Amino acid sequence: MQDIEQSQHRVGGGGSTVPGWVPRSVQNYIDHTEMGIPIRALARKQGCHASTILRQIRRVETLRDDPLVDGVLKTLGGKSDVAPTPRAPLERAMRLPAVANELPNAAQLSLDAIRILRRLSETGAVLAVAADLEKAVIVREGGGGQSTRTGVVDRAIAEAMALKGWIIAPKAERITRYHITATGRAALADMMARDESAQAGGSSDVETGEDSAAPRRIRYGLAESPLVALARRRDREGERFLSNDLVHAGERLREDFEMAQMEAEVASDWDGFLLTLRNDAAAVPMVGSAPAQRAHGRVIAALRDIGPGLSDVTLRCCCFLEGLETAEKTLGWSARSGKIVLRIALMGLKRHYAQNADQSGAMIG
């Protein structure tokens, strides 16, 4: 769905606001269908023709067949069954502030969307949503009917992304599968560019040349990760160089790394972070949400378990998506040695996760 306009929108003249990421067309739809504001009044307020508002309302109404869009519209409109009386709009306005608090704010949506849309850009990736679950999962379908779960998404975030037209499902089913849209790819490129610009501005006084030890997140090759590319290779016996369980172990570390929002922390002091892995007393920083703190702890535990000698290449290829050739050059290794070391590291990760199966191993809440 096209984003027509986005702005902070006050509900019913009160102090509550709908998040700024909600498209203006959706705000008009809620105002008309839930608050009872006439179409002509909305058109006069926005300085446009009434037919424009009418087309917006009709377009939003057609989207309610999508379960995620329907869910977020119910949240925006309030979940009460107030009778259509003259007092109903006021009653709804009084109920809306508590409901609006369930929606993510613009900053949280942008932060989560970068992680999710990057995953959905990979070949064969879909967002699977079940009607009765609060979480959705990202699944990447591979050859031979094999699939790898690569991420977990809060339903509220998924609903917001569907409302903005970043993901779409061909049809609603018991388990609905969403794909990234062209609008979603454009939004991802824009958010990643702004995120990189902000990081560059914050570290403009730091040397970041090619000789820097810390890897930088790549912006190309979003269709596949280094692990997926390596998994397609065959050894001398014709077997896949990386099995599905090794790829899954690397993807699980990446998911925790991104959930914990550790990229800036690690990149800003690469050597210092690797040093903390040798320090068993290093604590998880008390910042961010509780799930982010738990994810941070899982990353630290996994990297410590495989050892400092393997943590470097694991972080580079699994979390920062740095190519093997680049990692080999930075680390001063001989050509084609990186894939052997990375496979050993992934074997260690697989063993760690097998021994800590109760550590939210399924990656779903």
Image: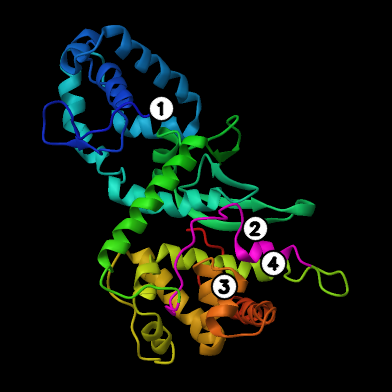
Of the residues under marks 4 and 3, which one precedes in the sequence? 4
Of the residues under marks 1 and 3, which one precedes in the sequence? 1
* Residue 148 horizontal/vertical position (percent): 65, 58
Mark seen at residue 2: 1
Q: Which of pointers 1 and 3 indicates the residue nearer the eye?
A: 3
Of the residues under marks 2 and 1, which one precedes in the sequence? 1
Q: Main secondary structure of the magenta part?
A: loop
Asked if the residue under mark 1 is in contact with the one under mark 2, i.e. CB atoms within 8 Å, the reply is no
Of the residues under marks 4 and 2, which one precedes in the sequence? 2
**Distance (Cα) linking label 2 and label 1:** 31 Å
**Distance (Cα) linking label 4 and label 3:** 14 Å
Front position in the image: 322 or 179: 322
The residue indicated by pointer 2 is: 148
Mark seen at residue 326: 3
Of the residues under marks 4 and 1, which one precedes in the sequence? 1
Q: SS at mark 3?
A: helix
Category of crowding for the residue at label 3, using alpha-carbon neighbours closer than 10 angstroms: few (below 14), some (14–19), many (at least 20): some
